[in-house]
Amino acid sequence: MKKYIYIIIACFFLIFSFISCSEIVMEKEITDKTVILVSPTNNAQFFSTGVTFSWESVENATKYNLQIAKPTFLSPLQIVLDTTVTSKSFTLQLPIGNYEWRVRAASESYNTAYTNRLFSVVSNTDFQSNTVTLNAPTNNLITNTANQSLSWQSIIGATAYQVQVYSDSNTLLVDQTTANTTYNYTFPEGNYQWRVRASNGTDYTLYSSRSVLVDLTPPNIPVLTSPANMGTSTSSATFEWSRNAISGSTEKDTIYIYTNSTLTNLYSENQATSPYTSTLTPGTYYWKVVSSDSAGNSGNASLVYSFTVN
C-alpha cells in the first residue's frame, strides 16, 4: 500500500514540476532587447524645469524602471528618482542642474540592460513651457461621489495656480486662483472638464485638463414581464423585463434566479439584457432583476416573480 502512495506522490510532484516549468518557459525572454529612448535627446538643455521622459515600448515587457541621477550614475551626488511605471513616459519637475537618466524594460522574470542619456536644466526662463501634471481624480473618472479633491504636482517657480471647471455645455462654473496644489469642489450631476495652469506672476503655462462624469442617481426599478408571476415555463425559460433608462453613466441589469421563496438558494446570477434565456430543470423558481451603473449606484430590486418548470 505504501508503495502505491509513494508512486502517487512522485507522479504528483512530476506533474507539478512540469506545469511550473511550462509556465516559466511560456514567458519570453527580453534580456537581449534594447530600450530606445525618445526624449530628451542626449545632452539636451532645458530652459524650463518640467521635463518629460519618453521611450519606445519593448515587446513582452510589462513595466519600465526609470532612474535619474545628479549629475551622473558614475559619480552620483543624488539619485533623484527611482520608479517603476507601466506607461512609456513620465513627467518630472527638476531644479537647475546636470542629470543622467536611464530606462530598462522588465517582465516578471527578466530585465533588459539600462539605456542612458545626459541632459541639463539650464534655467527656468521659459516658465510657460512647463506642464502641470494632474494627479487626481483620474481622467474620465465616472463616480457617484460629488465632492472631489482636485490635485496636481507643483511647478518650480510657480506662485499661483488657476483652476477652472467647465460643464459639458462649456459654461464656466469655477475660476479660482490658489497657491495650493489642491482644490476641493462639489460637482453637480453631469459631465465636466476641470483644468489647471501655473503662473509665476508674469508668465503662464498652458492648461492641463481632465474630464469627470458625476452620476448620483440610481437606475430605475426593472419591471418583470415574463415568465408571468406564478406561471409555467418550459425548461428553456426566456426572461423578459423592462426599465426606463436614466441619462448618465452606463446602466446594466443583473438577473438572480433562486430555488426557494426565501431567496437563500441562488441558482444563477448573470449580468444580462432582456430577453435572457436559461435552461432549467423541473421545479419552482423565483427571480428578480437589480440594476446598477458604472458610477457605482445600485437601484432597488424588482418584485420577485415565481414560476414552475414542468
Image (cartoon, grey):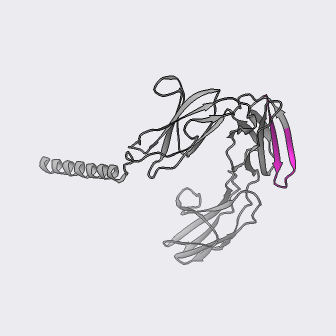
Q: Position of residue 165 (x, y in %)?
A: 81, 45
- Count of marks overlaid on the render: 0
Q: Position of residue 266 (x, y in %)?
A: 53, 59
When asked about the image quadrant of residue 202, the answer is top right
- Asked if the magenta segment contains residue 174, the reply would be yes
Q: Residue at x 36, y 49 (%)?
A: 29
Rendered view: 245 above or below 191 = below
In the image: residue 164, left or right of residue 113: right
Please name whichever residue, 75 or 172, is drawn nearer the observer in this view of the structure. Answer: 75
Decide if residue 248 is in sight here: yes
Rendered view: 271 above or below 200 = below
Residue bounds of the magenta highlight: 159-175
Decide if residue 82 is in sight here: no
Our reading of the magenta stretch's main secondary structure is strand
Rendered view: 225 above or below 168 = below
Please name whichever residue, 181 or 43, is drawn nearer the observer in this view of the structure. Answer: 43
- Asked if the magenta segment contains residue 168, the reply would be yes
Please name whichever residue, 291 or 162, is drawn nearer the observer in this view of the structure. Answer: 162
Q: Residue at x 68, y 47 (%)?
A: 139
In the image: residue 248, left or right of residue 267: right
Q: Position of residue 50 (x, y in %)?
A: 67, 35
Q: Position of residue 293 (x, y in %)?
A: 68, 56
When asked about the image quadrant of residue 208, the answer is top right
